[in-house]
Image (tube, grey):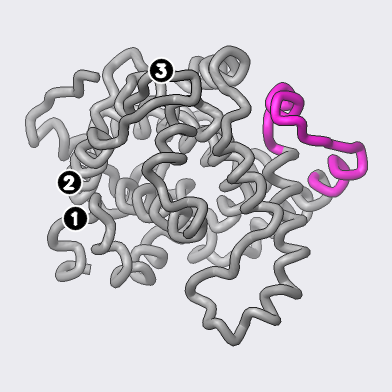
């Protein structure tokens, strides 16, 4: 569980700016369509599934859990030098996440395989958004983006060699972990239930509950369609999830419409990170990994 040691100068050199590929691709609002699949890939890892079960409020507050993940991603990509403090605090927070798996073995969030897997799933999902629902990422930008995320991984304390050195290697790594490491954990079922019947977002006042009940069914259908359809087939089988030819056609149609809308999608929706951080400026300081001066500066 050793971390990467570096000077402050080396750390700040790994932070990202407007000229980075990540800045251009990391905050497309269509990322919500892959959020469920990404979370399942994470919690199917036994260590992560146990950590979420024992140390997360996901059952009670699924939306808050989603926004905390988004807060972290947006801060690391779009807050410049603040990313150094964000990643250091996040690693410190993970030191407390440990316990016992259902089989009696012990787990710790900083186990290298589990810790690196979260970073891998985030960049994997980022690329998936553009490949499935957008116009894709240019090959030169794709490799540059992945190298930037390796740098962010170094800030997190992910050791050299815990993640592959290039994008092709990352794809092979994902396939290997899916085949050999991911399981049908208890937390997988919790996530699937929350997607099938999503709770009313906390920003919506209680009086909107009747309206939410009307909206919830189509929203749940789209979320379930994307979540199950984007999973590797071997995981669908492992989780006991049904996937029909009709569902596949629906997902393909949804993706085609999304791709067609890309040229007219407003820039603030394609690069939503800066606006997101402004919108969440009052909420983010409540997170343990928020930069100390965030509320003042932002």
Marks 3 and 2, how far apart at CA: 32 Å
Q: Which mark is residue 291?
A: 1
Q: Which residue is mark 3?
A: 105
For residue 205, side relative to residue 287 (left or right): right
Residue 130 seen anywhere in this rendered image of the structure: no
Instruction: Give residue 261's quadrant in the image.
Output: bottom right
**Image quadrant where one finds the C terminus:** bottom left
Q: Say whether marks 2 and 1 touch (CB < 8 Å).
A: yes
For residue 60, side relative to residue 71 (left or right): right
Q: Position of residue 35 (x, y in %)?
A: 57, 47
Q: Which residue is mark 2?
A: 85
Image point 52% across, 34% down: which residue? 43
Residue 107 painted magenta: no
Image point 76% across, 25% down: which residue? 237
Image point 17% across, 46% down: which residue? 85
Marks 1 and 3, how far apart at CA: 35 Å
Dot 1 or dot 3: first in sequence order is 3
Q: Position of residue 96 (x, y in %)?
A: 24, 36
Which of discs 1 and 3 lies nearer the camera? The answer is: 3
Q: Nearer the viewer, residue 145 or 79?
A: 79
Q: Residues within 10 Å of mark 3 (few under 14, many from 20)?
A: few
Residue 245 painted magenta: yes
Chain part drawn in magenta: 230-251
For residue 26, side relative to residue 237 (left or right): left
Q: Residues within 10 Å of mark 1 (few under 14, many from 20)?
A: many
């Amino acid at each position: 569980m050793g971390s990467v040691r570096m000077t402050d100068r080396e750390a700040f050199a790994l932070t990202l700016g407007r000229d980075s590929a990540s800045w251009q691709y990391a905050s497309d609002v269509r990322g919500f369509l892959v959020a469920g699949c990404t979370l399942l890939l994470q919690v199917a890892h036994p260590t992560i599934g146990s950590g979420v079960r024992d140390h997360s409020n996901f059952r009670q507050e699924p939306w808050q859990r989603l926004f905390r993940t988004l807060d972290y991603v947006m801060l690391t990509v779009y807050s410049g030098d603040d990313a150094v403090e964000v990643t250091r605090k996040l690693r410190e927070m993970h030191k407390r996440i440990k316990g016992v798996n259902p089989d009696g073995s012990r787990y710790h969030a900083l186990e290298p395989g589990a810790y690196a897997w979260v970073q891998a799933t985030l960049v994997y999902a980022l690329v998936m958004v553009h490949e499935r629902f957008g116009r894709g990422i240019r090959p030169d930008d794709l490799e540059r983006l992945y190298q930037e995320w390796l740098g962010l991984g170094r800030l997190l304390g992910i050791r050299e060699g815990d993640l592959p050195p290039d994008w092709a290697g990352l794809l092979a790594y994902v396939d290997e972990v899916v085949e050999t490491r991911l399981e049908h954990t208890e937390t997988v079922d919790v996530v699937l239930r929350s997607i099938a019947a999503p709770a009313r977002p906390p920003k919506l006042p209680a009086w909107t509950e009747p309206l939410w009940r009307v909206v919830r069914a189509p929203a749940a259908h789209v979320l379930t369609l994307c979540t199950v359809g984007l999973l590797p087939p071997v995981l669908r089988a492992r989780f006991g999830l049904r996937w029909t030819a009709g569902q596949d056609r629906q997902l393909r149609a949804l993706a085609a419409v999304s791709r067609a809308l890309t040229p007219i999608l407003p820039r603030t929706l394609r690069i939503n990170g800066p606006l997101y951080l402004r919108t969440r400026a009052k909420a983010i300081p409540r997170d343990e990994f928020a930069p100390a001066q965030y509320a003042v500066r932002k």
